[in-house]
């Protein structure tokens, strides 16, 4: 209620000073009492309303309220000094409070918390704000500062610097307005920020008009300009009432509206026009051509932004399609075996039923791994893979991995491995590595795939050879990055998500091994190979020589 009362009284006094009809003496009397009441009242109610919030939000509004209250103290000191001494010295204590209020209000605006954004978005906003700040400074200097920031040889050192600080404070207010326009909140961009921005704009505009009028001896107390300041104080008092209302959440605090992109470039666009008006003919032509080039550059950047958006949308659609494909394969196997068992349970013997149930379990585990790995990849957590290591029979792992492929692709795989070779690994994770590499070979190969495993010193070396085109040299490093598909990243008819190799690499490195790619010396396509530390060989019997082992499956 106090905030609304101050708002109404300040707005009424401001309108009385702006609108014609009252005499000069009446306007002077209104300003004499309205100035201290509106400025002090607006600042204090704004500071009191800040305690509705906590943390940084509270300090931001409190700083703005105290800054406005400093202007109120300055108004009171000015009026008291004028009433007692009938003349206010310059500079005085009133000027001290005036000047302190500018950085406090600006700091309060900058303290307002933002919604969390990414590093690139924060950097872009900072660049946009820098462009706007430089543009405002240049426009203000050409049109305003160089005319009022003059050092008079007859004035004292202190008077000269006070003259310079006032317009600098106005520039701070304009930069604060731009910061308000860029602010991204978790709540809807409410009326409170619009009121604060309007108040700061009116205050800065009134200051810019006031100083030239004073220098030309055209200003008198109670003129229309005082009404603009009073309306600014009314807006600040109204802000106190608005922030006491319940906040309304915004659907997307990260959306970038066109006005936010244009605001910092408005002073930049105005700068060539101002220079052209104030320069000679040759400079005007240069300014015109510069403006045309700047316009073309901005248009080019806009088109590049649209292109990036379209590419991002296509990549998103491709990722969604690939994710659905990755999940469809194990789901199809689970659904098919489940229907067979549900419809013809008695037709299958015990061993066949066990194998089908085992395959259903394997595919369900594989599906869960795919979902987990997609989540881990998007969060960047592939470095924290947990393993349940034990001695595993390599031949069993290979046969299980081949059974995970579509039936039409299983016949293309030839296995060469020692049936008694063991490896110290996590059974499910090793299965996932081999399945990922086999799936790649099936997708990009033609007819033949060789899965070869043997000893390599103290490690076990796994190799997957295919007869496809291989990996172009320029993509040999890129294929290990998440969602990167090398030569097939755009417009490819081959399905894929671009996560198989990054997942395989993370799992191999978690086992303490290495994974590489090179040209296959068997089939001429690509060869992906990785090493896993082997278990200790039995002490009582020599290690048998590797021999080809063909996978056997129950049908």
Image: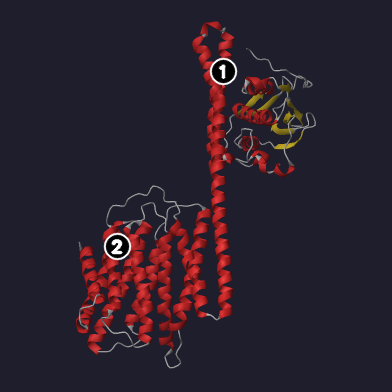
Q: What element carries label 1?
A: helix
Q: Which of 185 and 232 is in front in this view?
A: 232
x, y (%) of residue 329?
57, 25
Q: Which of 78 and 15 is in front in this view?
A: 15
x, y (%) of residue 66?
32, 69
Residue visible at 28% across and 78% down in the picture: 224
- Res 102 quadrant in image: bottom left
* Numbered disc in front, either 2 or 1: 2
> Which quarter of the image is occupied by the N terminus?
bottom left
Q: In this view, does 132 lie to the left or right of 25?
A: right
Q: Which of 356 and 223 is in front in this view?
A: 223
Q: Is residue 359 left or right of residue 265?
A: right
Image label count = 2
Q: Which of 322 and 236 is in front in this view?
A: 322
Q: How crowded is mark 2: few (under 14 residues within 10 Å), some or many (20 or more)?
A: many
Q: Is residue 358 left or right of residue 524?
A: left
Residue visible at 44% across and 55% down in the picture: 257
The mark found on residue 358 in the picture is 1
Residue at label 2? 239
Residue visible at 49% across and 70% down in the picture: 135
x, y (%) of residue 17?
24, 76
- Res 400 quadrant in image: top right
């Amino acid at each position: 209620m106090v905030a609304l009362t101050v708002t109404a009284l300040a707005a009424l006094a401001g309108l009385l000073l702006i609108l014609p009809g009252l005499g000069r003496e009446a306007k002077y009397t209104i300003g004499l009492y309205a100035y201290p009441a509106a400025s002090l009242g607006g600042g204090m109610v704004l500071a009191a309303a800040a305690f509705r919030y906590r943390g940084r939000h509270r300090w931001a509004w409190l700083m703005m309220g105290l800054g406005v209250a400093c202007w109120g103290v300055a108004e009171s000191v000015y009026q008291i000094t004028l009433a007692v001494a009938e003349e206010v010295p310059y500079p005085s204590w009133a000027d001290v409070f005036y000047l302190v209020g500018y950085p406090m209000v600006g700091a309060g605006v900058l303290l307002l918390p933002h919604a969390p954004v990414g590093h690139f978005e924060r950097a872009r906003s900072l660049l946009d704000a820098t462009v706007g700040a430089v543009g405002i400074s240049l426009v203000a200097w050409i049109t305003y500062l160089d005319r009022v920031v003059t050092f008079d040889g007859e004035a004292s050192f202190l008077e000269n610097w006070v003259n310079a600080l006032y317009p600098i404070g106005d520039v701070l207010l304009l930069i604060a307005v731009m910061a308000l326009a860029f602010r991204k909140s978790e709540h809807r961009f409410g009326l409170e920020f619009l009121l604060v921005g309007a108040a700061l704009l009116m205050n800065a505009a009134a200051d810019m008009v006031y100083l030239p009028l004073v220098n030309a001896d055209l200003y008198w107390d109670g003129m229309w300009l005082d009404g603009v300041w009073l309306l600014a104080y009314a807006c600040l008092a109204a802000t106190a009432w608005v922030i006491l209302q319940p906040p309304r959440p915004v659907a997307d605090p990260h959306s970038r509206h066109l006005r936010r992109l244009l605001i910092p470039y408005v002073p930049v666009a105005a700068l060539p026009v101002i220079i052209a008006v104030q320069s000679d003919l040759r400079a005007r032509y240069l300014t015109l051509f510069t403006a045309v080039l700047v316009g073309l550059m901005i248009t080019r950047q806009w088109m590049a932004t649209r292109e990036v958006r379209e590419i991002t949308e296509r990549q998103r659609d491709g990722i969604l399609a690939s994710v659905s494909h990755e999940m469809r394969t194990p789901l199809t196997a689970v659904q098919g075996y489940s229907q067979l068992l549900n419809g013809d349970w008695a037709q299958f013997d015990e061993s066949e039923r066990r194998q089908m149930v085992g395959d259903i379990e394997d595919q369900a585990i594989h599906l869960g791994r795919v979902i987990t790995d997609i989540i881990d990849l998007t969060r960047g957590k592939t470095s924290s893979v947990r393993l349940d290591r034990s001695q595993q029979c390599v031949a069993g792992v290979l046969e299980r991995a081949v059974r995970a492929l579509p039936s039409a692709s299983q016949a293309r795989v030839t296995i060469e491995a020692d049936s008694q070779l063991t490896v110290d690994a996590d059974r499910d994770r090793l299965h996932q590595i081999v399945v990922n590499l086999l799936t790649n070979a099936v997708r990009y190969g033609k007819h033949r795939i060789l899965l070869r495993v043997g000893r390599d010193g103290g490690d076990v070396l796994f190799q997957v050879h295919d007869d496809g085109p291989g990996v172009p040299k320029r993509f040999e490093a890129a294929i290990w990055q998440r969602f990167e598909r090398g030569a097939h990243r755009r417009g490819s008819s081959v399905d894929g998500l671009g996560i198989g190799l990054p997942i395989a690499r993370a799992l191999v490195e978690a086992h303490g091994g290495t994974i590489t790619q090179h040209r296959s010396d068997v089939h001429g396509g690509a060869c992906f190979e990785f090493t896993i530390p082997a278990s200790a060989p039995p002490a009582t019997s020599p290690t048998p020589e590797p021999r080809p082992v063909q996978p056997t499956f129950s049908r």
